[in-house]
Image (cartoon, rainbow, N blue to C red):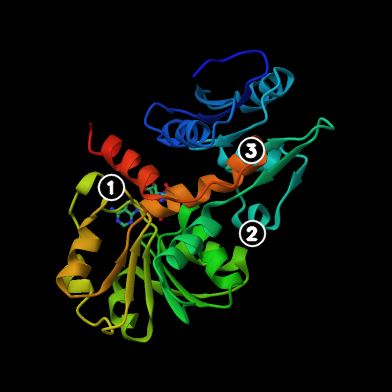
Amino acid sequence: MTITGTTKLAGVIGWPVEHSRSPLLHNHWCASHDIDGAYVPLPVPPGSLDVALRGLQVAGFRGVNVTIPHKEDAFRFVDRKTQSALRAGAVNTIVFEDDGTTTGDCTDGKGFLANLHAHDVGKSRHAMILGAGGAARAVAAALLDSGCRITIANRTLQRAIALRDALKGGEVVEWDAWPGQLASCDLLVNATSLGLGGSAGYDWSGSLSGAAPDLIVSDVVYAPLMTPLLQAARMRDLKIVDGLGMLIQQARAGFNAWFGILPQVDDTARALLLHSLNGN
Ligand code: NDP
């Protein structure tokens, strides 16, 4: 890659940001589409998002992705928000417009739905969503807005209630009660950080004992790819959808806005990320 004065620039702002696989993915897409572009990790500490965004805008960046812990500050920063950002209450993709304004989108929910679609999963009727953090909110909003009935369970009940109230839809069950409600669901989404890093610490197998045979089990956690939940689901012969596809799908809209091409989700991108996640 040769960077010149005409190279289109974008990046990801986070704190920390070293772990982000977004530079790998976007630079792969730039190379495979022969685009004169570059995407860089941008470590920005909490409290400094505004000054960083203004600086990048002045320096000619096309836009940025925003990750932990800046998604809510980014929501407050942008001049206009997409409907998805408004529903998610967060922004993960910012476009610096030619007129000097900024547009914020949240692509996690759409990425989640697109990943289900890519796995030939049809429209869900009733989803059980575990979690009430940022990922859960984006997934819950996308499913609800697609016409799906949703039930939310979260370790901290109050946060599940707050999420339901913010979305103005859905039902809430206590954390210990969700396995008992699974029989009526055709989709289970783990949108908690349970399973991150492969940590067990939860009886997924027992919790799935009441699942209908056609339950689709999905996890937003993608490191490891086969999370403890997905392993338990596979043992029960349930169809599974891992979180890596969501990660790739949610990146496409930003790439399109900054570099002008909507990239396809191919096996090469997936293999590249898997290779990196496996520590190679
Ligand atoms: P948040 O910190 O906002 O939320 C974490 C959630 O996990 C909360 O609901 C929390 O419950 C719950 N939780 C944490 N520990 C436990 C536990 N021991 N038992 C039960 N529940 C627990 O994180 P995010 O929503 O931003 O991210 C969640 C996961 O989603 C992360 O692993 C992240 O990497 C992944 N993610 C994946 C994406 C993808 O593209 N595949 C996109 C975005 C995120 P409580 O409220 O009680 O604390």
Residue 134 locus on image (x, y percent): 49, 51
Measured as percent of width and height from the top left, residue 181 is found at 34, 82
Q: Earlier in the sequence, mark 1 or mark 2?
A: 2
Q: Is mark 3 within 8 Å of ligand 1?
A: no
Q: Which residue is tagged 2?
A: 87
The residue tagged 1 is 196
Three-letter amino acid code at the position of disc 1: Leu
Nearest the viewer among 225 and 90 is 225
State how far apart marks 3 and 1 are (Cα). 25 Å
The reply to whether the residue tagged 1 has its Cβ within 8 angstroms of ligand 1 is yes
Mark 3 = which residue?
A: 74
Instruction: Provide the secondary structure element on which disc 1 rests.
Output: helix
Q: Is residue 99 left or right of residue 228?
A: right
User: Is label 3 in a helix, a strand or a loop?
Assistant: helix
The local crowd at label 3, few if under 14, some if 14 to 19, many if 20 or more residues have their Cα within 10 Å, is many
Dot 2 lies on which element? helix
Disc 3 residue type?
Ala
- Left or right: 133 with respect to 164? left
- Left or right: 197 as drawn, with respect to 150: left
